[in-house]
Image (cartoon, rainbow, N blue to C red):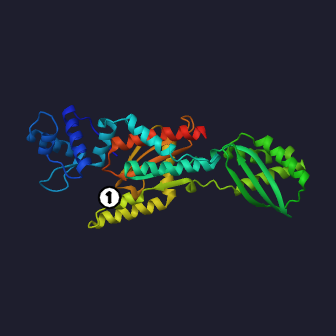
Amino acid sequence: MPETPPINRRAQKILQAVVKEYLQSGEAVGSRVVTRRHELGLSPATVRNVMADLEELGLLEQPHTSAGRVPTEQGLRFFIDSLLKVRGLSPKEKDEIRLRYAEQGTQRTGMDAVTEVVQRTSRVLSEITHHTGIVLAPDPSLQRFQHIEFVQLSEGKLLCILVTTEGRIENKLVQVDLSVDGGQLDRIHNYLDALLGGLSLTEVRRRILHEMGLEKNRYDDMVSTALRLGQAALDQVDNSRAGGLVVTGQANIVDLARTDDPEMLDRMRQLLQALEDKQVVLQLLDRTIKAEGIQVFLGAETAIASLGESSVVAVPYGPEEQPIGAIAVIGPMRMNYSKVISVVDFTADLVSQIIAEL
């Protein structure tokens, strides 16, 4: 998106007025509406001239001749970055969000409890904003290794039980051309626990590959067998993040669509399809995790064609130094940014706190 040239304070006030009116009504905004509803101390003719200047700068556009103007994507970006005043949530509004979590207290532990919080958060975002709520669960590859155990089922076939410090338990069937007895398995468990304890699952994979490359380990039968079993077990662990993406409130997209507008219906179908293809949304939330603070993506900024008419407000959650997931709200470009940003920001802080205490 091209960089917006500087505009004076008067032009900023008029742009702000046009955007606010448009976000509320969805209709093109004329100069008389601006002068009547906003105390600018300017005549309709002056406002009209400034609006024409803003149109030349690419911040406004006139959808129909002799009609008012609406903000362009560039105009919305300038508004959000420079003019938007985000209203923080009131104590009552914060308490209402907290209550949605407290009244559905969980008896679960570990990753089951995290999964429940993630699902609940998606519903909370959708219900409060009346848009689509999306939550990316903590990245499985960031969870830390605690214990691994193999149970012999038959010759060459073992059941692997992998436990992380966060309480995630993976049961995977491992087939290897190795023959091991119970005593060997105990030594293997102890060796791998000592070698890999406290490492993230991504680090575990790297450590195993490193140890397998060391000359000394090639001639130690127990160590060599342990590393081969560890590698086989980790290859079976599902680290796909798509399964950890929870989407709620798709019906809100349908409610916003006018059934007599074929183009709008087509855009709605494309958006619903994008939400079904979770890898598309994952790319956007991964960008959020790598950034700092709240991200607002407008249309083409998402780099996803099906979101070309939508806005996404997203923020990471978890420790500031290493976020573990992200939450987001997807809606039309004509959304109440002040409210949505406040809700997303507060909810992310609350989720971070809840997960840290599990």
Tell me the amino acid under the disc marked 1: Leu
User: Mark 1 highlights which residue?
Assistant: 256
- Residue 188: % across, % down: 85, 48
Horizontal side of residue 321 vs 86, given as left or right: right
- Residue 313: % across, % down: 41, 46
Residue in the image at 64% along x and 46% along y:
109
Horizontal side of residue 188 vs 44, given as left or right: right
Horizontal side of residue 213 vs 69, given as left or right: right
Q: Is residue 310 above or below residue 157?
A: above
Report the front residue among 35 and 76: 35
Residue in the image at 39% along x and 39% along y:
93
Report the front residue among 16 and 6: 16
Badge 1 crowding class, 10 Å Cα cut-off, few under 14, some 14 to 19, many 20 or more, is: some
Regarding residue 291, the answer to whether it shows in the image is no
> How many marks can you see?
1
Task: Quadrant for the C terminus, please.
Answer: top right
- Residue 102: % across, % down: 51, 43
- Residue 273: % across, % down: 44, 63
Q: Secondary structure at mark 1?
A: helix
Report the front residue among 281 and 249: 249
Considering every residue shown, the one lying at the far front of the view is 103
